[in-house]
Image: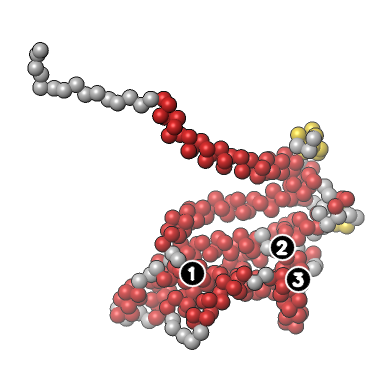
Amino acid sequence: MEATGYQKLTIPTIHPVSKWKKRIPYLVAYGILGITTLPIILMYVWLLLSSFSKKMKFGFIPTSFTVENWSFLWSNVEHGGSELPSIWTATWNSFVFAGSLTILEVIIGIMAGYALARIEFTGRQTIMKMTLLLHAFPSVALLIAVFYILNFMGLFDSIWGVVLVKTALQIPMTAWIVKGFFDDVPWDVEWAGMIDGCSRFQVWYTIVIPLIKPGIAAISIFSFLSGWSEFLLLYTFTVSDNNVTLASYLQKLISDPNMINYGLLSAVSLFYMLPVLVFFIFTQKSLMQVSAGGGKRV
């Protein structure tokens, strides 16, 4: 036998059966996700088809397509013998409500969260324990009390009055979330800034705030979405057409079950969803950053 200095290299072969065994968990996971999300996907498909069709065969197959359902974009809708307010008035009011809520909630929440995280004061632990309980308290139980307060202040049938109410209800959870981000900022960072001559406010504004940008992005996104989807408070405390929002506009379309135009309702629903989809596209990066770092915050 001839001796050589090389050994034959053998590459192990992977049997096709073992490949399938490794893929079984993934197939099962994707199968379960597909089955559970299929009704939601079909719902959105129906919504899209219905908004561009005159009539649906078997409730799902469009017989003819039209853009008449989208006529609310350029003219007011007549429903139940009365004319509904302009969709653009409702859209503007929704943006004003959600934007104002976001600004107030972020500003107040940041200050409250910093106080809870850094400042020792009497009742601090009690406030933190009560925070979650206050957030869990159902707002519907406060409707009568809120009505008397808004009426006394002259803010009934005013979007700004509802903004204040919604902000007060959201602040406890916002402050709790922001506190977790402040807790992750080391004390040494603030001490170093004050040693360099900065005041406490300068340290907070120029050093600490930039370090919790993911947290600010998170509460901003959630505040805007919460304001955009708000219905109960707006429906209860704003009654005039000048203060109608998109959520209230949809309610007007389904107020009479015998006169529902499902094509129009589907079109308005899609229109209501579009700003949220655009908002999510531009903020999903910030959401992913918060999700990736969320495990560090308790």
Q: Which quarter of the image is occupied by the N terminus?
A: top left
Mark 2 and mark 1 lie on one chain; the one further toward the N terminus is 1
Residue 281 appears in the picture as rendered: yes
Q: Quadrant of residue 37?
A: top right
Q: Kindly check if marks 2 and 1 are in contact, taking CB atoms under 8 A apart as contact.
A: no
Categorize mark 3 by other alpha carbons within 10 Å: few (<14), some (14-19), many (20+): many
Look at the numbered disc 1 and give the secondary structure of its residue: helix
Place of residue 282 in the rendered image (x, y in percent of width and height, measured from the top left)? 53, 53
Callout 2: 10 Å neighbours few (<14), some, many (20+)?
A: some
Classify residue 14 as left or right of residue 84: left
Q: Distance between the residues labelled 3 and 1?
A: 30 Å
Amino acid type, mark 1? Val
**Label 1: which residue?**
178
Disc nearer the start of the sequence (3/2): 2
Helix, strand or loop for disc 3? helix
Mark 3 → mark 2, Cα distance in angstroms? 10 Å
Badge 1 crowding class, 10 Å Cα cut-off, few under 14, some 14 to 19, many 20 or more, is many
Is 176 in front, or is 114?
176
Nearer the observer, 136 or 171:
136
Quadrant hosting residue 230: bottom right
Q: Residue furthest bottom?
A: 122
Q: Which of marks 3 and 1 is nearer the N terminus?
A: 1
Residue at point 16%, 23% (across, down) = 7
Q: Please tell me which residue lies in front, 89 or 107.
A: 107
* Residue 193 visible to the viewer: no
Residue tagged by mark 3?
237
**Rendered view: 126 above or below 293:** below
Q: Determine the secondary structure under disc 2.
A: loop
Quarter holding the C terminus is bottom left
Q: Give the labeled residue for mark 2.
A: 231
| Residue 274 x %, y % | 64, 50
- Which dot, 3 or 1, sits closer to the camera? 1
